[in-house]
Image (cartoon, rainbow, N blue to C red):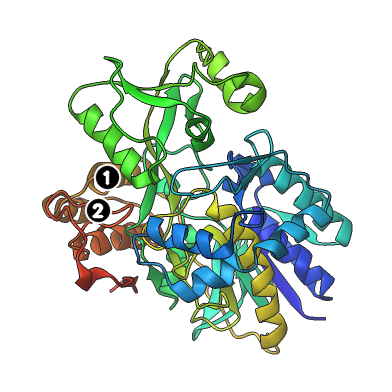
Amino acid sequence: MTEVGVIGGGIAGLTAAIALVKQGYDVTLIHAGIKNTNSYLAQAGIALPILEGDSPNAHVLDTIRAGRYLNDEETVWNVISKSSEAYTFLTSLGLKFEENEVEGGHSFPRVFTIKNETGKPMTKILYVRAKELGVNFVQGIAEALAVRDKKAYGIFLDGELMKFDGTILASGGYTALFKYTAGSELNLGTLIGDAIMKGAPARDLEFVQFHPTGFAGKNGVKLVSEAVRGAGAKLVTEDGERFVNELEPRDVVARAIYRQLQSGKRVFLDATGIDDFKGRFPQIYAFLKKEGINPERDLIPVFPIAHYSIGGVSVDLWYRTPIRNLYAIGEAASNGFHGANRLASNSLLECVISGLEVVRTICRDRPRIRETPELRYSDNELGDIESLRELLWGYAGIVRDGASLEEGLRKLDGIEVDERLKILAMGVLKNALIRKESRGAHFRRDYPYMRKEFERPLFWTGF
C-alpha cells in the first residue's frame, strides 16, 4: 500500500489526510496538536460564492482586485470554481454554518461563519473524522525534509527517518518570524526554508499580510476579526475621528492605521453600535473582558500585526513542488491564488480545495519509493529567533523602503539562527528590495505606486 506523510494538523493537512484515506492510501499525519495551528485560530469564516445572487465570477473578480492583479487567473478559477465541492465536503462531515458575513474586499456577504470562530469547529470536526477513518496521527514536529537529488523520501522526526512514498507539506506559513502576530508561534516557516535549500524555490515571499486590528494585552497578542468591522464597527483616532473605509482590503486599512500611529495618535475600534456583541463574537468578547474591556461600551485599542504569509513554497496548479514526490498545500504553498494581497476568508477555502486537489494529483502521479539512499540529517538549533523577529518587524514591516531593506540584509548576516530561517528571512528582504513598487501587502514609501514591469511573481532560490 502506498504510504503518504502529511506534515501539519491544520485544515489543509486534515482535508488531504481524509481524502487520501478514502482513496485507499496509508496515511500518517505528523502534527504538534490541532490547537497549535492557524486554522484552529481562524476567526471569521470561509468564502463560498454559492448563495443566490452571488457567482464564482464575482468572487474571482473580487479576489483579483484584492490581489492587485498579480494573481494567477487560472489558479483563482481552479480554486473558486470548486467552492460547492468544498461546501459539500464540509457539510457532509456534519459541519453547520450559522451566518453569512461581508468582509473587506467582498462584493457579497459570502463569508460562511460559525460564531466568528469558524476555524475551531472546522478543525475539530476534520480531526475527529480523520481519526475515525484510521489516519495514523503522530505527535511531534517534523525537523527536516528527507530529500536527495531533488527527490523526497519522507521526513525526519526525533532524528529518525520516517519514509513515505509521497510527502505533503501542510505546515503553515512564516508569520511567527515577525515580532507581533496573533497566529501560531510554530509558524516559523522552518520547512519552507528547508525546501528552498533542498531545491524547491519559494514564491512571492515579500507579500506578508498585516491584519489591521490586532490587540496587545497582558495575555498576549490577539486578533479582533474583520467580521467585527463587517458588522458595523468603526475605526477612530483618540480624537474620535474616522479616517478610513473599514471595509477596504486589509492592506489599505492596515496602512491607514499605521499612518495614524506614526503621527502619534492612538487608534481604536468602536464596536459599541453592534447589537449583541457578546452573542455574535463570543471568543473576542471573552478575551477582551479578561483584559478589562467591555466592547459593548468601551473602545478597543488596535494596531496592525503580521497575520498571513502569502508567499510560500512554489507549486504548480496541482500543488506539486519541483522536488519529486513532495507536495505543498495551504499557507505553506504559493501558486498565485492570492496575488499580492489575500482576500479575507479565502485562506480556509484554499486550505480545503488544495487538500482535495493534491489527493487527485497523488492519485495521478502514483508516487513510489522502492530504494532509499543514504540521507543526511543535521540537528539544527533554532538560535536567536527573537533578534530575527525584531529585524523583520523593523526592516520588512508594514511600510518599507530600499535603505531599510538593505540595512536589514546587512544586520541579518550577524544573527545566529538556523540557516533555514535565515534563508527564508533573506528571501523576504531581497524580494521586497527587488520589487521596486507598492502592490497589495507590499508597500514601499520610496515607490508608492504599482509598476507594470512588476506585474509578475518573484521567486527565491536562496542565491
Left or right relative to 239: residue 107:
right
Residue at x-position 28% and y-position 45%: 397
The residue located at (63%, 19%) in the rendering is 278
Q: Is residue 168 above or below residue 379?
A: below
- Disc 1 residue type? Leu
Quarter of the image for residue 6 reads: bottom right
Residue pictured at 76% horizontal, 68% vertical:
19
Dividing the image into 4 quarters, which one contains the C terminus? bottom left
Q: Seen in the image, is 117 located left or right of residue 92?
A: left
Question: Cβ–Cβ below 8 Å for labels 1 and 2?
Answer: yes
Q: Name the residue carrying label 1.
A: 391
Is any atom of residue 41 visible in this view? yes
State which mark lies toward you, 1 or 2.
1
Q: Secondary structure at mark 2?
A: helix
Pinpoint residue 267: horizontal percent, then vertical percent: 32, 23
Report the residue that reaches farthest toward the front.
53
Residue 323, position in %: x, y? 51, 81
- Residue located at (29% from left, 60% from top): 426
Residue 349, picture quadrant:
bottom right
Q: Is residue 9 visible?
A: no
Few, some or many C-alpha atoms within 10 Å of disc 2 (few <14, some 14-19, many ≥20)? many
Cα–Cα span, label 1 and label 2: 7 Å
Given residues 156 and 333, the one toward you in this image is 333
The residue tagged 2 is 412
Which amino acid, mark 2?
Leu
Of the pair 438 and 389, the residue shown nearer to us = 438
| Quadrant location, the N terminus | bottom right
Image check: 277 left or right of 33?
left
